[in-house]
Amino acid sequence: MRVAIVGCGGAGSEHAFGYGQVEGLRIVGCCDVVLEKAQQLASKFGAEAFTDFKEMIEQVRPDIVSVCTFEKDHAVVAITALNAGAHVLCEKMLAASLDEAKTMVRVAREKNKLLATQFNYRHIPSVRWLKGLLSSGALGELLLVNLMVHSYCHHHGVDLLRFLFGEVISVQAAMRGGRNEVPYRGWEGISEDLLYIPPNSFCAIVHFESGLLGVTTSSFRHRLEDLMLELHLVTTKGRLSLRRMRYENICGDLDTNIDLLGAPSFPEPLPFKATFALSVQSFVAVVRGEPAEIATGEDGMRAMQIEHALLMAARTNQLITLPPMA
Ligand SMILES: NC(=O)c1ccc[n+]([C@@H]2O[C@H](COP(=O)([O-])OP(=O)(O)OC[C@H]3O[C@@H](n4cnc5c(N)ncnc54)[C@H](O)[C@@H]3O)[C@@H](O)[C@H]2O)c1
């Protein structure tokens, strides 16, 4: 299979590294508006460098395209690739607006191609360990979930809430400050109706379909090297925390008073970067028809619907109900 990468910065390089480890795959094209960045990445994989993604897709006819530009260009690149018959792995946030996300999901369905959202946090070994324990019943019944997250990781946190605890049906929220507090380089073109990267102070109550209640707090003022995410659960058997999930060890530190004798052991420490390759490789497996865990385009769009609801809840001080899953 032939792979092309659009956007050869931090995320694009991690995707390429992930594909580079898969047998039977070849990276054939690397595109960046900055030619040197495209050339630099292309030279590592024997690929051709481009500055125009349309030209690249036309010339190299990839089976897979990874979309690793900033959000404002996700839709145009993904839709071009899907229309050209490629499967697409798109970085989060899936699109810059809900309308764009809907179009991406529709085109993927029409073309019968896989559109996946790069929610690599689903592949954190401690997250998968926790999901296994939750479904085995080893933790008892869940009573309360508390997610504390750095603003840059908030969007992943929203996806993880769904991944681990089921569908979100409504939210309440409060916020101090706005986008001007967050020096994200990719704000251009992102709808004002999406929260995406919360400012210094954001908190929310999340209502799950199961009746479970969750609380999330997020701040841009956490230090990223110190804390990306932290998850605390209260269950009928006690409490369990994944503390300080962070760059150098994204699994975090387990802290629990629940007896886990007989349960699988807690995973070894893992650097955050390693989650990209795990996620890219799962995407390739699903493209090949093998069973693997991925976040779909629909999952990416749902996370955006929740971001929209969270912002509306904070703006109006009302409980906001999510639309049903499309
Ligand atoms: N999943 C994760 O954990 C994670 C982590 C970091 C970034 N991201 C996401 O990855 C995306 C890129 O972020 P980044 O940190 O890699 O940024 P970056 O600035 O390092 O890379 C983006 C690259 O895209 C190029 N680019 C911009 N417009 C382009 C276009 N139209 N065609 C081709 N190239 C273009 C830029 O020149 C730049 O090299 C964003 O959507 C971001 O949210 C995800």
Image (tube, helix red, strand yellow):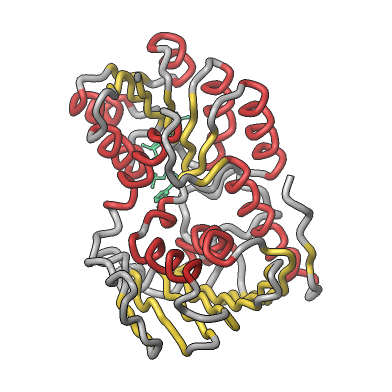
Image: 227 above or below 189: below
Q: Is residue 311 visible?
A: no
Quadrant where the N terminus sits is top left
Q: Point out residue 57 in the picture as x, y percentages from the top left corner.
A: 45, 16
At horizontal 53% and vertical 42% (from top left) the residue drawn is: 71
Q: Is residue 166 visible?
A: yes
At horizontal 50% and vertical 66% (from top left) the residue drawn is: 135
Image: 57 above or below 233: above
Left/right placement of residue 114 relative to residue 56 reads: right
Image: 41 above or below 265: above
Direction top: furthest residue: 59
Classify residue 26 by image quadrant: top left
Left/right placement of residue 180 relative to residue 91 reads: right
Left/right placement of residue 179 relative to residue 321 reads: left
At horizontal 61% and vertical 63% (from top left) the residue drawn is: 166
Left/right placement of residue 114 relative to residue 222 reads: right
Quadrant where the C terminus sits is top right
**Which sits in the foreground, 267 or 158?**
267
At horizontal 69% and vertical 44% (from top left) the residue drawn is: 98
Classify residue 227 by image quadrant: bottom left
Which quadrant does ligand 1 occupy?
A: top left
Q: Point out residue 217 in the picture as x, y percentages from the top left corner.
A: 55, 76
